[in-house]
Image: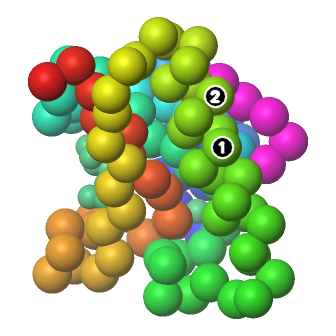
Amino acid sequence: MDCIFCKIINKEEPSDFIYENDNFIVIKDIKPSAPVHLLIIPKKHIDSVKHLEPEDKDLMGEMVLCAQKVAKEKNLKDYRLRINVGRGAGQIIDHLHMHLFSGF
Ligand code: 5GP
Ligand code: ZN
């Protein structure tokens, strides 16, 4: 599968890693649109929110907690979390991810 985020997860493509655990990586967005712009990416390839199954419930909870953990570590007081779903909503990478913006 030709997925840039899977390649980054498998360390086949370089990226700025902020955090990693068994289920997630957190990297800096290559084209930041805020002073802090991170991507929380599950290691499991899921195309988008549209493709989530009931079994992914825990993973999605963990995704928000992962964002919270990184925000705490970086002392971010306020931040915005966003998931784009579908091209019309701005999703360009078909591997589920959540944006974390801060420092406006
Ligand atoms: P989307 O628009 O799909 O919600 O978000 C994809 C994000 O991934 C975009 O903000 C884009 O700048 C970022 N991005 C695309 N390719 C790469 C890459 O190779 N490395 C990193 N770190 N970010 C990427
Ligand atoms: Zn992928």
**Range of residues picked out in magenta:** 19-23
**Element class at badge 2:** helix
Question: In terms of depth relative to the viewer, which is nearer, 44 or 100?
Answer: 100
* Residue 93 at x, y percent in the picture: 37, 63
Relative to 63, residue 32 above or below: above
Q: Amino acid at mark 2?
A: Lys
The quarter of the displayed image where residue 53 is located = bottom right
Considering the image in quadrants, where does the C terminus appear?
A: top left
Would you say residue 63 sits in the magenta stretch?
Answer: no
**Element class at badge 1:** helix
Considering the image in quadrants, where does the N terminus appear?
A: bottom right
Q: Name the dominant secondary structure of the magenta segment.
A: loop
Q: Which residue is mark 2?
A: 69
* Residue 65 at x, y percent in the picture: 66, 43
Is mark 1 in CB contact (under 8 Å) with mark 2?
Answer: yes
Report whether 46 appears left or right of 83. Answer: right
* Residue 85 at x, y percent in the picture: 34, 76
Q: Amino acid at mark 1?
A: Leu
Q: Which mark is residue 76?
A: none
Across the whole image, how many numbered discs are drawn on residues? 2
Residue shown at 62% from the left, 84% from the top: 52
In this orientation, does residue 74 appear? Answer: yes
Residue shown at 63% from the left, 52% from the top: 63
Question: In terms of depth relative to the viewer, which is nearer, 45 or 69?
Answer: 69
How busy is the neighbourhood of tag 1: few (under 14 within 10 Å), some, or many (20 plus)? Answer: few
* Residue 75 at x, y percent in the picture: 47, 10
The quarter of the displayed image where residue 39 is located = top left
Q: Which residue is mark 1?
A: 65
Residue shown at 79% from the left, 48% from the top: 23
